[in-house]
Image: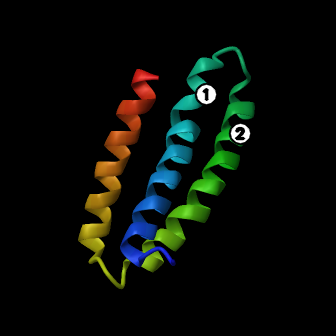
Amino acid sequence: MPISAPILTILLLVASNIFMTFAWYGHLKFKTAPLITVILISWGIAFFEYMLQVPANRIGHGHFSAAQLKTIQEVITLSVFVAFSVW
């Protein structure tokens, strides 16, 4: 059974935001690492974020407006960040 486009969009956005959160904040645990190293690693992680977010927005745009997609993304971002902060 194929996954519906709205569910697939949300799943891809959740996965994208997990990568984004690690790219933006994961390096804070490695304060002794050189800045250029953490920047390059963060960019590498962000690559996978975009590999998920762009298809999510493309797939979802037929079912959600741009404003709805952004709102969904922001709710997911806050939810993922809360979980990341607790962890």
- Front residue (pair 67, 83): 83
Q: Residue furthest bottom?
A: 62
* Residue at image coords 70%, 14%: 32
* Residue at image coords 52%, 69%: 54
From the image, tell me which residue sits under label 2.
41
Q: Secondary structure at mark 2?
A: helix
Mark 2 belongs to which amino acid?
Ile
How packed is label 1: few (under 14 Cα within 10 Å), some, or many (20 or more)?
A: some
Mark 1 belongs to which amino acid?
His
The answer to whether 84 is drawn above or below residue 40 in the figure is above
Q: Residue furthest top?
A: 32
Residue 5 is situated, as x and y percent measured from the top left of the image, at 42, 77
From the image, tell me which residue sits under label 1.
27
The answer to whether 57 is drawn above or below residue 50 in the figure is below
Would residue 71 be found to the left or right of residue 32 on screen? left
Residue 61 is situated, as x and y percent measured from the top left of the image, at 37, 80
**Disc 1 vs disc 2: Cβ atoms closer than 8 Å?**
yes
Q: Tell me the quarter of the picture where residue 41 sits.
A: top right
* Residue at image coords 67%, 38%: 39
The answer to whether 48 is drawn above or below residue 37 in the figure is below
- Front residue (pair 32, 7): 7
